[in-house]
């Protein structure tokens, strides 16, 4: 295997969510911290898609923002094409690096400026990076980008409110493609859309990936979407990766009990009658996470070791799993 385009090692982000100082003094409470991302490591090969899945609040979107430099990491490193992201973004090479990576946000209704026409929205990165200086050239380039995502070049003269949600997300994709990036971070780009529109947007993204050799980090909580777009899947729980596997392997033979729980939540329309292990409870409070394995309060396989010792993400047969039960062969 060649070196990954994106390589993440021991990435962590801690947020200080403490009340104001005077409130803490009066209530005699200590400062409060949330470990939104806690020691995440993975790599994404050039031209492939890694999907991160998990319940809301598990740290997926924080990872996305760390990878494009919107947040600074508390610990760990992100390397893009061999360059350290934080060092490059702090130096003169920042504009060139930012051109090579872009982000598609979750809500197409909030990520587009309602006062700007589509021409200005899509042309903004072109002007910001000095790729287009003439007005006529910008209009021509915006027309090409809109055509690439299935919109009419004449749509450049309209405002965002004149489009449906799916069309707005296509505009967001066109804006992200403006600088001809190599790496796109997609933060739940279809979660706000109807199912039929989701399919259209996903097909556009897959087609663009084939034509332009794009590399994707795809954030989602919808496993049906992940099955459609991903090459590899990382499952996150309370800020940590609990399983990383090729897509086919993960859906066919999930190892971690949490991965099994996510897959068991998908309706069995074929009525296969396969055994399902119900997992009760909800995600713990991230301000006060459980000791040992974060999943142990909900896990039917948990024992004393799980409650006391945090499992490491260990490789076995092309899959990485963080689970004592899997390591000890107790999964059945």
Image: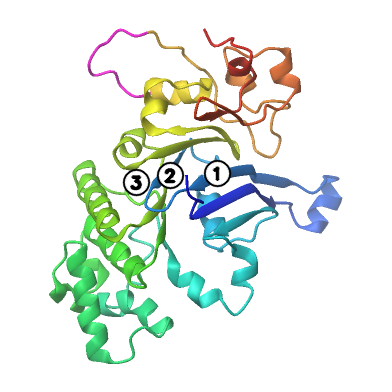
Considering only order in the chain, which callout, 2 or 1, is on the residue closer to the N terminus?
1
Classify 10 Å Cα crowding around label 1: few (below 14), some (14-19), many (20 and above). some
Q: Earlier in the sequence, mark 1 or mark 3?
A: 1
Residue 42 highlighted magenta (yes or no):
no
- Residues at marks 3 and 2, CA–CA distance in whole angstroms: 17 Å
Q: Report helix, strand or loop for mark 3.
A: loop
Q: Nearer the viewer, mark 1 or mark 3?
A: 1
The stretch of residues the image draws in magenta is 265-274
| Residue annotated with mark 1 | 42
Q: Position of residue 125 (x, y in %)?
A: 39, 77
- Viewer-nearest residue: 7 or 66: 7
The disc at residue 249 is: none
Q: Secondary structure at mark 2?
A: strand
Q: Residue at x 40, y 24 (%)?
A: 263
Classify mark 2: residues with Cα within 10 Å, few (<14), some (14-19) or many (20+): many
* Residue lying at 50% horizontally and 50% vertically, measured from the top left: 61
Q: Which mark, by number, is residue 191?
A: 3
| Residue at horizontal 23 percent and vertical 53 percent from the top | 207
For disc 2, the marked residue is 50
Image coordinates for residue 329, horizontal then vertical, percent: 59, 11
Looking at the picture, does residue 62 appear above or below residue 315?
A: below
Quadrant in which residue 320 is drawn: top right
Residue 115 visible to an observer of this rendering = no
Left or right, 208 with respect to 321, comes to left
- Upstream in sequence: badge 3 or badge 2: 2
Question: Disc 3 vs disc 2: which is toward the camera?
Answer: 2
Left or right: residue 48 versus residue 307 is left
Q: Secondary structure at mark 1?
A: strand
Identify the residue at horizontal 27%, vertical 48% (top origin): 193
């Amino acid at each position: 295997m060649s070196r990954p385009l994106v390589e993440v090692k021991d990435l962590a982000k801690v947020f200080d969510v403490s009340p104001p100082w005077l409130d803490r003094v009066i209530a005699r409470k200590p400062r409060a911290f949330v470990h939104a991302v806690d020691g995440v490591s993975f790599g994404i090969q050039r031209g492939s898609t890694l999907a991160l899945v998990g319940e809301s609040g598990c740290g997926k979107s924080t990872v996305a923002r760390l990878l494009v430099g919107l947040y600074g990491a508390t610990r760990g490193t992100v390397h893009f094409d061999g360059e350290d992201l934080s060092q490059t973004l702090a130096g003169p090479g920042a504009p060139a690096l930012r051109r090579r990576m872009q982000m598609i946000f979750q809500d197409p209704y909030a990520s587009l400026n309602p006062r700007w026409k589509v021409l200005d929205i899509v042309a903004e990165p072109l002007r910001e990076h000095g790729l287009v200086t003439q007005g006529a050239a910008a209009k021509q380039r915006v027309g090409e980008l809109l055509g690439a995502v299935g919109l009419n070049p004449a749509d450049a003269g309209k405002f965002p409110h004149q489009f449906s949600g799916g069309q707005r997300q296509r505009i967001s994709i066109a804006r992200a493609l403006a600088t001809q990036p190599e790496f796109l971070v997609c933060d739940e780009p279809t979660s706000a859309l109807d199912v039929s529109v989701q399919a259209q947007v996903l097909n556009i993204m897959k087609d663009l990936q084939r034509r332009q050799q794009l590399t994707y980090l795809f954030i989602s909580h919808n496993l049906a979407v992940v099955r459609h777009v991903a090459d590899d899947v990382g499952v996150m729980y309370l800020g940590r990766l609990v399983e990383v596997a090729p897509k086919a392997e993960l859906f066919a033979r999930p190892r971690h009990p949490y991965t099994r729980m996510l897959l068991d939540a998908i309706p069995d329309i074929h009525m296969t009658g396969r055994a399902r292990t119900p997992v009760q409870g909800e995600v713990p409070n991230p301000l006060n996470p459980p000791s040992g394995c974060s999943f142990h309060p909900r896990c039917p396989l948990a024992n004393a070791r799980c409650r006391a010792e945090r499992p490491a993400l260990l490789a076995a047969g092309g899959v990485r799993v963080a689970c004592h039960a899997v390591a000890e062969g107790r999964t059945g």
